[in-house]
Image: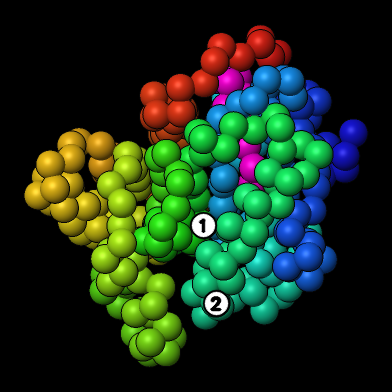
Amino acid sequence: MIERFARFPAALAERAKSVRLASDIVDGGVPTLLAHPDWERPAPFVLWLHGRTVNKELDPGRYLRWIRAGIGACAIDLPGHGERFEKDAQRTERTLYVVEQAVAEIDAVLGALRDSEHGAAFDFSRVAIGGMSAGGMVTLRRLCDAHAFVCACVESTAGDFSRMPAYEGRYPAEMTRRLDPMQNLEHWRHLPLLALHSDADEWVSVEAIRSFTETLRERAAASGADPDDVRLHTWPETGAPAEHAGFGRMANEAKNLQSEFLTRWLRPEAAPAAGE
């Protein structure tokens, strides 16, 4: 077994692979965890981006739920994290620098996966993107430019940096404007989006995602699309650390909501049974 998968449930570990993608574009390649329901039939999949200071192996139960539902996973280590750890990248002051680099890597990762020996196992006509915290910011900013994603899901993240007062003065104003999803909606294409958040989040105010999803719903209604495709689900409090890292006692409900959302929009075929 791959050492980094040692704490994975057996049913996930036996269906997971560790690869490096886009080494021709990113020095050393992007460390990537791939998981697949059976490695035979092309499966829809999610490009997943973790939060700051953790790594792609965090929360393996998420990936296990996906493969049980017939959905694959392509989870990368953010720049300076996991297998490409850099101490400086863990600092709060580096968050947007990590976000900007990750946004620039997404297309290279997907292109490299498509061209790799594993590419045929993934259905590139049914790809979702998602992330938690900093990974959610990467997700929302990437969706502001042309893309082919079917749907997206984010957790404990910000889509409106004007509701992140700590960013003022921490980052150059032009950088904040460039990366703020709310300020880059000119080319946003309507797609189903599920956002999960704690009302009591101490690190990312729920208003930083509420104002963003409300804006998307207004845009959808104005264009004739269904505003209910964009959904924000919150809990008054969850018991998670700082009400930000995971969803505490609401974690199972959060995972169920996400799995149901992805299953609805990615339309996976029935997956083979997987044990615990």
Name the amino acid, label 2. Answer: Tyr
Query: Does residue 153 appear left or right of residue 41 in this picture?
Result: left
Q: Mark 2 — residue?
A: 97
Q: Image point 41% across, 57% down: which residue?
A: 146
Taking depth in this image into account, of 131 and 103 the one nearest to the observer is: 103
Query: Does residue 226 appear left or right of residue 108 in this picture?
Result: left
Q: Position of residue 89 (x, y in %)?
A: 64, 74
Query: Does residue 215 appear left or right of residue 146 in this picture?
Result: left
Q: Image point 90% across, 33% down: which residue?
A: 1
Residue 136 is at least partly visible in this image: no
Q: Looking at the picture, does residue 270 appear above or below residue 158?
A: above
Q: Mark 1 — residue?
A: 135
Q: Position of residue 145 (x, y in %)?
A: 40, 62
Real-space Cα separation, disc 1 to disc 2, in angstroms = 12 Å
Assign a secondary structure to mark 2: helix
Residue 187: say if magenta.
no
Neighbourhood count class around disc 1 (C-alpha, 10 Å): few under 14, some 14–19, many 20 upward = many
| The C terminus - image quarter | top right
- Magenta range: 67-75
Q: Position of residue 82 (x, y in %)?
A: 73, 58
Q: Along the polypeptide, which appears first: circle 1 or circle 2? A: 2
Assign a secondary structure to mark 1: helix
Q: Position of residue 208 (x, y in %)?
A: 28, 62
